[in-house]
Amino acid sequence: MNPRERVLTTLNREKPDRVPRELSYGYGGFTPGAYAKFLDKTDSDSPEEYFNYEVRAVSYPLPNKRDKSYYREIGTDIFDDEVDFNNEYEKEYLENMAISLGEWGIGIEPGGEGSKHFVNQIPPMEGYEDEKQVEEHPFPDYATSKNFEYLQEEVQSIHQNNLAAMGELYTTILETAESLRGMEKLFKDLYARRNFVTTLFEELTNLRCKQAKQYAAAGVDILRLGDDIGDQKGMLISPDIWRELLKPRLRRIIDMAKDEKEDLLVFYHSDGDCREVIPDLIEIGVDVLNPVQPEVMDPASIKKQYGDRLAFWGTVGVQETLPFGSPEKVRETVRERIKTVGKGGGLLLAPTHILDEEVPWENIMAFFDAIEEYGVYS
């Protein structure tokens, strides 16, 4: 069974030859500090290749040119001319500016002295007063024919290497809205300015539908959606509000993608405890739940309850097991997850979030060694 077949068999809730694996998110699964440790410990600059991930991510390319109309001016008019972010100037610019600006117009500044992972965001819609301003906001245009050609080429390259391709649409609606409006203001708007919120959510949904359709047409095997809707004690927002404002919009995005590619697998990410809406996620077409955070949800119990309708991706905790457990504890956890959540297939093992530099290297190696030892299906 090649790596792509292994992943697709697993996520279709069937038994593969062995349990597939991944580390999650940027830098191949590491924060910058942890990635520096990886570079020091190995002769590789690619965690994906070094640890033999069976999956590769596909994302839209950043625009070559970023017009000043995409940005809110912050303190100074630094966008009199277009800036070419694909030359040597980019490096110097980002190193010397306290605030950098993404294509959404969201200001990004360091979150603390020496921090390269945690950041503060400056929301461009913080001062918006009405829905018309939202409608006139210069949202980025991703779903172009040029970008489609790029995605197709990326997917074909991944498939030629017998790997599974996943299209990235993390921060699908809610988290992008939080970054644009500011989390506190957006949560107040959910109750006090419902028309404002629905206008913003609708704009984002229309954009995501176009992207989802394009990812599916480009041939990705998996579409990764997600918004953090849970915390350590339950849902961040009322389940009823989630069902009213977000569930039907997620359904539209999923339907758009699956109408284009019937066998597409839809992955949904939420940190924290999202048990109250797991049946709703299944109802709208989610196939894979991530990360199944063990500090707040028992993975074995979730498997028993929903394993006939969902596959699971993650389950190994980054709050306790990986940073503070012994290598023996990590191995024991991996073995237990394979025995319970992986029973009969349906488990792609991964940490539940990006690894920070506090995670001992010995624990990272114990994670992968245990998958090699215990992850073979008879």
Image: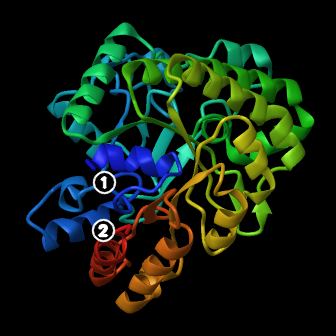
> Dot 2 lies on which element?
helix
Q: Note whether 87 is above or below 321 in the view shown.
A: above
User: Is residue 360 in view from this perspective?
Assistant: yes
| Amino acid at circle 1 | Tyr
Picture colour scheme = rainbow
The quadrant where residue 369 appears: bottom left
Residue occupying the point 78% across, 18% down: 131
Residue 86's place in the image compared with 51, above or below, is above
Seen at 86% across and 41% down, the residue is 241
Name, please, the residue furthest toward the top: 145
In this orientation, which residue lies closer to the viewer: 26 or 168?
168
In the drawing, does residue 64 fall left or right of residue 259?
Answer: left
Q: Which residue is mark 2?
A: 34
Residue at 39 percent of width and 69 percent of height:
356
User: What is the crowding at mark 1: few (fewer than 14 residues within 10 Å), some, or many (at least 20)?
Assistant: some
Specify the amino acid type for callout 2.
Ala
Q: What residue lies at 35% left-to-right and 88% top-to-bottom?
A: 327
How far from the left and from the top, in percent, is residue 233?
77, 68
Q: Are marks 2 and 1 in contact (CB under 8 Å)?
A: yes
Marking on residue 90: none
In this rendering, does residue 318 appear at all?
Answer: no
Q: Quadrant of the C terminus?
A: bottom left
Q: Secondary structure at mark 1?
A: loop
Counting from the top left corner in percent of width and height, residue 37 is at 22, 71
The x, y position of residue 177, in whole percent, is 66, 35
Res 27 label:
1
- Taking depth in this image into account, of 25 and 338 the one nearest to the observer is 338
**Name of the residue lying farthest toward the front:** 378
